[in-house]
Structures are given as C-alpha cells and as structure tokens.
Image: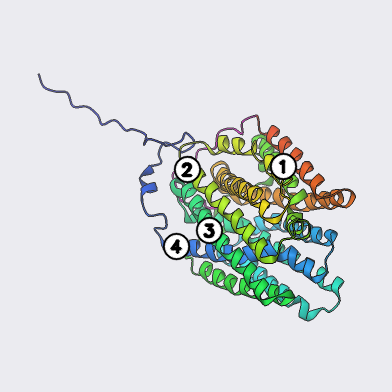
C-alpha cells in the first residue's frame, strides 16, 4: 500500500513566548546580534553614551555638594531634570512625526546641546566665584541637558524601531542595555578614582571634561548610522495623543509607572548625599558602590535574558514590580559605606530588569504609526515623577530625615504594584514589516 504524502507540520520553535506573532521566525535570534551597519553604530553610540552619562549621573550631586550646595539645592537638580522633560516631550513627539530626518533631531538635541551642557558644567567653577550662583548654574545646565535629551527622545525611539526588526527587537535591545551597563560599571569607579587623585573641585572638572569628550565620540557614532528615507509627511499616518489617553490598559500602566518612579525619586537623589554625609564615603568609594550597583544590573539583565524570549513582558513586569518595594527597605540597614553594597546590587538588578521590560512593553504594545506619541507620553510620566518625587523627598528629608524618605518610597512602590494586579492586556499584533513608519 502506497504511503500517503503528508504535509510538513510547521512547529512553533520551542521557547517562543505567546506575545510574539506566529509569523515571526526565531532563526534570527541565532544570527549575530549586530548584523547591519545601523546596528553596529547604534551599539557603539550606546556604549559611549553610557560611559559619558554614568559620570554625570553618579557625580553631579556630589559635585554640587563640593561647590557648597545644600540638600534642598541637590533636590533642585532632580526637579530641573524632570521639569525640562515634561516641557519638551510633547513638542518632541510632534517633531518626530514631522521631521524628514529623526537622526538629525537626535544629533541636535541630546548629541549636541546635551553634550555642550556637560562641557559647561565642567566650567562652572571658573565662571562663577559665588557659591550660590555656581550651584544654580549647575541647576540651569541640568535643565538644558534634560530639555535637549527629552526633545529628541521620541525621534530616537522611532528610529530604533526602524533599525531593529520586530522579531529581534526585544532580544537585541536587552543585549544592548546589558553592554551599556557593563560600560557604566567600568566608567564610574575610574571617574571616582580620577576625582580623588586630582582632588577638590578640579577633580570633578576633569571628570566632566572626560565625559564631554566621550560624549562627542558617541555623537559621532550616531551620526554614522545610515537613515532610510522617510515617506513624505502627507503619506505617513498622523499620530494621536487622544488615542493614547483613551487606551485604558496603557493608562493603567502609566499610573503604575508614575507611582513607581515618583516613589523612587523621593529617595533616589539623596542616596549619594547619604553615602558621603552619613556613611562617610569618599568619591572613590562612591564610584565603587556605583560599580557594584552596575554589577547588580548586569546580573539582573543576564537573568532577564533567560526569560525574555519565553515569557510575556507584561507578566515579567508585574512580577518584578512586586519585588521593588524591598529595595529602599534594604537601604535602612547600612551603618558604614561598604554596607551599601547589598541595597546597591539589589537595586541595580531590579531597575535594570525594569528598564528592559518597560521598553519592550512599549515596543510590543504601541501601534507603529503612533509610537512616537506613546514613547513621549511614557517618558513624560517618568520625568513628571522626576519632578514630583524630589519635591516630596526634599520636604520629607527637611522635616524628618532620609530614612523616613526610604519608608515613604517603599510604601509608594507597593501601591504601584497593586495598580498592576489587573493584567495589562495582550500586546497588539505587529504588522509583517520591519519598519515602524513613525
């Protein structure tokens, strides 16, 4: 009896999570991660930018303290950062939709004005003798830097969606973030040692000049990314802010994000001050703690990489959110600077995983035509938290102390986790195209 020919059975590759569309082949996960010119230059830009930003993020508040800033003025640095972002993101989303070149928006914003702000920060002690004026100059430059970065953020996200095809996007972005974390882990302690060796205000000036130089190399790398021509504006779908705000599942996610980041920023801007003033850490030791935190981030991203292609991002995100209230509670334990290693490594792991998952959620969920608006509103919520959180933290620290702020932060994070007990909803199916068009 002749054997009947059977149609080949198309099997879903093992490990493919339900959120990935059925038409996606996982064979691309086995190819080289950075397989195109665009991806390689984007990767180089990220590493160099991470090195530059790690110096500013870790040492700006200590730089301000060295110039004579009070706790309230340290809080103003974070408030300025958040306020600038709130003001710039909506115009930035509109610019991302209308501009013929998103790359040049990024180069002019974060890659141009943002880098010059870092250079100016290095020159503040030379330009201003008065302590009060010098500190407020740092606040103003922080505002300018944040304004430039926020204005170009929607364009950056939209161009990223064009660079990485949908089937490799989550994996490649998580691997890129891991590399950025490694770069920051190396840069922060080197900067701390340099500050201590040079000594005083000049040490911070040298560190910020180095951050500016590395930032210029990052800008050069981004400029080398080939950008595909966009369709004329009239042929591209128009974005809609109203559609974003009518998306109930996304609004629930934004509410949890606002609560989480506000709670984190109640205490976050004061941790470096806490290390120096209460735990008696030197700049080199602050850099070492930053390196330990980055090591935790590496572990967190590596562990997440084992699950990101097998589990839905929404499920992983909700699970992670339930663990984050324990991080500020761990900060209650240290009695000397090296005790801060435990909360630092825990916080580094948790926030690194959070950043990857929140970005993947955005890229999976947002309709491609409206991606710049989704990205802008999400980032605006985060920066609003950067405005409200430090304001609340400044008041709490003023009337009590930083340990009370840690408790307030933990309570706020629990509330954020409760908001997302109800599922986010299934991601929208992506079209079978490798570009976002937005």
Magenta region: 422-438
- Residue 177 colored magenta? no
**Front position among marks 1 and 4:** 1
Mark whose residue sits in front, 3 or 4 = 3
Q: Which label's residue is closer to the chain start, 1 or 3?
A: 3
Q: Would you say the residues marked 1 and 3 are in contact, meaning their CB atoms lie under 8 Å apart?
A: no
**Which corner quadrant holds the N terminus?**
top left
Which of discs 2 and 3 lies nearer the camera? The answer is 3
Q: How many marks?
A: 4
| Label 1 or label 4, whichever comes before in sequence order | 4
Q: For mark 4, does the 10 Å Cα neighbourhood hold few (<14), some (14 to 19), or many (20 or more) residues?
A: some
Residue labelled with disc 3 = 182
Q: Is residue 67 left or right of residue 306?
A: right
Q: CA distance from mark 2 to mark 3?
A: 34 Å
Residue 143 % position (x, y): 75, 64
| Residue 329: numbered disc | 1
Residue at the spot 42% in from the left edge and 63% down from the top edge: 37
208 lies above or below 340: below
Percent position of residue 97, x then y = 61, 56
Q: Give me the disc on residue 108.
A: none
Mark 2, residue position? 431
In this view of the protein, can residue 108 be seen by the observer?
no
State the CA–CA distance, disc 3 to disc 4. Answer: 17 Å
Q: Residue at x 83, y 62 (%)?
A: 73
Lower position in the chain sequence, tag 2 or tag 4:
4
Q: Secondary structure at mark 1?
A: helix
């Amino acid at each position: 009896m002749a054997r009947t020919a059977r149609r080949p059975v198309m099997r879903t590759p093992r490990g493919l999570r339900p959120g990935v569309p059925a038409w996606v082949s996982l064979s691309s996960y086995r190819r080289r991660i950075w397989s195109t010119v665009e991806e390689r230059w984007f990767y180089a830009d990220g590493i160099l930018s991470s090195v530059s930003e790690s110096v500013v993020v870790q040492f700006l508040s200590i730089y301000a303290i060295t110039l004579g800033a009070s706790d309230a003025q340290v809080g103003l640095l974070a408030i300025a950062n958040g306020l600038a972002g709130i003001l710039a993101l909506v115009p930035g989303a509109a610019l991302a939709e209308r501009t013929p070149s998103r790359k040049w928006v990024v180069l002019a914003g974060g890659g141009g004005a943002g880098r010059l702000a870092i250079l100016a920060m290095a020159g503040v002690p030379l330009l201003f003798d008065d302590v009060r004026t010098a500190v407020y100059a740092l606040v103003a430059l922080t505002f300018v830097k944040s304004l430039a970065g926020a204005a170009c953020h929607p364009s950056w996200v939209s161009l990223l969606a064009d660079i990485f095809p949908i089937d490799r996007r989550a994996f490649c972005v998580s691997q890129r973030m891991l590399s950025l974390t490694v770069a920051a882990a190396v840069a922060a302690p080197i900067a701390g040692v340099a500050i201590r060796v040079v000594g005083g205000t000049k040490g911070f000036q040298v560190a910020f000049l180095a951050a500016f130089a590395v930032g210029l190399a990052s800008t050069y790398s981004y400029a080398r990314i080939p950008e595909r021509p966009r369709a004329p504006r009239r042929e591209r779908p128009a974005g809609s802010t109203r559609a974003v705000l009518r998306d109930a599942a996304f609004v629930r996610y934004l509410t949890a994000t606002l609560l989480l980041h506000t709670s984190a920023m109640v205490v976050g801007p004061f941790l470096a001050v806490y290390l120096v003033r209460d735990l008696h850490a030197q700049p080199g030791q602050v850099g070492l703690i930053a390196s330990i935190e980055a090591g935790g981030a590496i572990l967190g991203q590596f562990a997440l990489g084992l699950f990101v292609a097998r589990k839905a991002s929404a499920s992983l995100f909700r699970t992670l959110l339930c663990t984050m209230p324990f991080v500020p509670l761990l900060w209650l334990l240290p009695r000397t600077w090296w005790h801060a290693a435990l909360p630092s490594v825990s916080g580094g792991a948790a926030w690194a995983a959070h950043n990857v998952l929140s970005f993947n959620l955005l890229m999976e969920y947002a309709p491609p035509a409206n991606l710049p608006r989704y990205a802008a509103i999400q980032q605006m919520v985060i920066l609003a938290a950067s405005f409200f959180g430090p304001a609340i933290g400044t008041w709490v620290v003023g009337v009590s102390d930083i340990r009370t702020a840690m408790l307030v932060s933990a309570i706020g994070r629990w509330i954020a986790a409760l908001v997302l007990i109800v599922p986010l909803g299934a991601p929208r199916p992506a079209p079978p195209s490798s570009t976002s068009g937005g």
